Amino acid sequence: MSQASKPTDEVLCQCSGTRRGNIQNLFEQGLDIQAISRWTGALSGCGGCEWDIADFLKELAEQQSKNSKR
Ligand code: FES
């Protein structure tokens, strides 16, 4: 299943309680992964969420570039 079709209230970072929807919102405001991390506290604990978040952001970026070509 693609990340983007998963529930927005799913917690991606257990340490900070950051949800998928939060990350998507910040991404849509133009924040990159470092800025999102600073803003939410995601990735600043155990780091175990790094792959999930990086993956999700990559997917969002791909979607965005597809949409902008349409
Ligand atoms: S789960 Fe995100 S830093 Fe630990």
Image (spheres, rainbow, N blue to C red):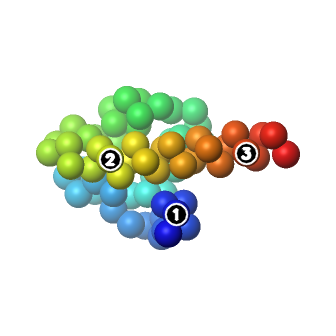
* Residue 17 in which image quadrant: bottom left
Q: Amino acid at mark 1?
A: Ser
Tell which of 58 and 12 is nearer to you. 58
First in sequence: mark 3 vs mark 2: 2
Q: Is residue 22 visible?
A: yes
What's the residue type where badge 3 is placed? Answer: Lys
- The correct choice, above or below, for 24 with respect to 68 in the image is below
Q: Residue at x 40, y 43 (%)?
A: 54
SS at circle 3: helix
Give the secondary structure at mark 1. Answer: loop
Residue under pointer 2: 51
| Residue 29 appears left or right of 46 | right
CA distance for labels 3 and 1: 15 Å
Q: What secondary structure is marked by label 2?
A: helix
- Residue that badge 1 annotates: 2
Residue 33: image location, x then y, percent: 41, 34
Q: Earlier in the sequence, mark 3 or mark 1?
A: 1
The image's mark for residue 14 is: none
